[in-house]
Amino acid sequence: MAGVYLSPLKPASLSRPDSDASKSSPSGVLFSRNRDGAIDLALGDTLALVRTSPPTGDAPEETVLLGQAEPSEPTDASDDDTFSPLPQDESPEDPESPPPSDDQPPTVDELEESAETEAGDDTSGEEASEEESAPEEEESAPEEEEEEEAAPEAEEEMPAAEETMPGDAVPIPEDTVLDELEYLDPDPNPLLIQTQPEEVEIIGTQPISLEEAVELAYRNNPDLQVAELELQQSQAALREAQADRLPTVSVNGTLQGQDTTETSSSFVGGVLQTESSESLGASLSAQIDVVYNLFSSGGRAASIRAAEEQVKFNELDVERRREDLRVNTANEYYDLQTAIESIRINQAFLEEAERNLRDTSLREEVGVGTRFDVLRAEVQVANARQDLVNAQRDRQVAQRTLARRLNVPPSLTITTVPVEVAGNWPLTLEESIVLAYQNRAELEQQLAQRDINEQLRRSELSVLGPQVDLFATYQTSDILTQDGGFEDNYQFGARVAWTLYEGGAARARAQQRALEIEIAESNFEETRNTIRLGVESAYFNLQSNFTNIETARLAADQAQEALDLAILRFDAGVGTQLEILEAQSELTDAEVNLVQAVVGYNRSLAELERAVSNIAENYYEALPY
């Protein structure tokens, strides 16, 4: 097993694998033995590397101190920072011992004994620390049971000392949310804009499964919300068209007042005399009109039918956008999975390259290596470190891309569960094609668009036919300043309107609708061919990626075995440094190919599900994700 560089972390920040082969003490001190017998110890702020050379012949075992490494910044390999399990025959201790001096390098046994002695003096760990630091014997079943009982106690105490770091998963506050998905819902105000830097700072990462991501997208994605609003808009337009089936009733009333002044002049005895009189008047009138369109030459029925087809079209559009949203979410989810796995692979390659550099430098110091080998190893480390940085960048971009799709709060980001094969497709190619023809909303949309244009064509021609309306009017009025009361008046009848000639505009509009019908029919044919091609492409990709998974897995195992042999050959003096470098590169390529094969299979399955669409819910319930 390759040695693992362990940066000093707080105990609560360490992620402990399930395997009993890897243990961490409450003080955060770990060590592991690599395949060459080297032991990496993380002690406080330094890293002491001790190499124990295997005995050859009658020569005793030799321990050489390589030195101390300066503390380095912890590398964010992935959101799930776990360490590789230690060998089963190794038992980690809980030392806080100082690094050995150059004058008298201690052996591995001395380091372990010193660690046990100082671990006994550490009183801050209480009972959990004492139980975890107890010596572990692989053959002793009672001690294993005691350690398993101590682990939950340590895990219960760890959250109190844990500090949230960027990229760490943030626990969901159970007292403030109803479920996990509600915790990731955005602010209900869509017009809210953050104005302070701390409001957009990423404070945590929430791991979710693919189905949870799809559910979040269904609930929060703005594009799908727009489609649903457009559906509601078309439903309102349908109610507007259906209103033409009912009569129109209108009421109006008038209250009018007037002030009349009459002036008259005359000469009496040569003198002009003027007389004026003023009269006040007021009147009140009310009227009720009822109009009903009895016959519209098919225009009213065509408008209602067109509105109904528009509602159907928008319902299908919501369905189409849901399917597109599902496959887009899956692809972005798999992009993030690929980026995280790329970090893991590049991190492992960097660790192996650093181990190789340490070995090469040691051989140069003792005179059995060359400067050329050291330079090649340094170049390999530099390239591996650059690849790791690029992989971390890709992970961050993929996280924000998926977060935008899911519309999560601005202070949170998303991570994924580990990569695994999503499932199997139960249908043959021919069954998949026929089922896609039956299920795809795009085909039904083209038929709905054809019907809409047909109804609009009839509506345009209806203006050339007679329009028959029934009407009734009731009116009452009264002059309030005079006696006599209200006077009633009513009338009813029918009106017929017929446009004999309007320049051919209606027929021209009808011709446009007829051409749009032909366009919809051509689009139907093109969509049908596109659907078949999509099903076939996804199906063929699914089969090839399934085969590639087994091939890539075998290649990864063989590449690991080849690397082990290259290291053994080099240690035995019959191999070269170039063989190790090539074997390490081939192992990295093989692991990348395996991840790409699994993720490619999952992508193909998602594309095939999209190509068929409207799959029964029990199909998704049977999938492992």
Image: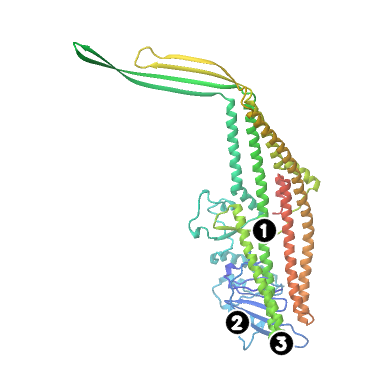
| Residue 67: quarter of image | bottom right
**Could you tell me if the residues under marks 2 and 1 are in contact, i.e. CB atoms within 8 Å?**
no
**Few, some or many residues within 10 Å of mark 3 (<14, 14–19, 20+):** few
How far apart marks 1 and 3 lie (CA) works out to: 47 Å
Q: Residue at x 66, y 40 (%)?
A: 316
User: Which circle, 2 or 1, is nearer the viewer?
Assistant: 1
Q: Nearer the viewer, mark 3 or mark 2?
A: 3
Residue farthest to the front, as pictured: 270
The picture places residue 237, in percent across and down from the top left corner, at 59, 34
Which circle's residue, 2 or 1, is located before the other in the chain?
A: 2
Provide residue 23's location: percent of width, then percent of height. 65, 71
Mark 3 lies on residue = 367
Does residue 370 sit above or below 279 in this rendering? Answer: below
Q: Secondary structure at mark 2?
A: loop
SS of the residue under disc 3 = loop
- Residue that numbered label 2 is attached to: 99
Q: Is residue 272 above or below residue 101?
A: above
Q: Nearer the viewer, residue 559 or 95?
A: 559
Decide: is 62 above or below 242.
below
- Residue placed at 54% from the left, 21% from the top? 291
Task: For marks 3 and 2, give the CA distance.
Answer: 26 Å
- Disc 3 marks a residue whose amino acid type is Gly
Distance between the Cα atoms at labels 2 and 1?
Answer: 43 Å
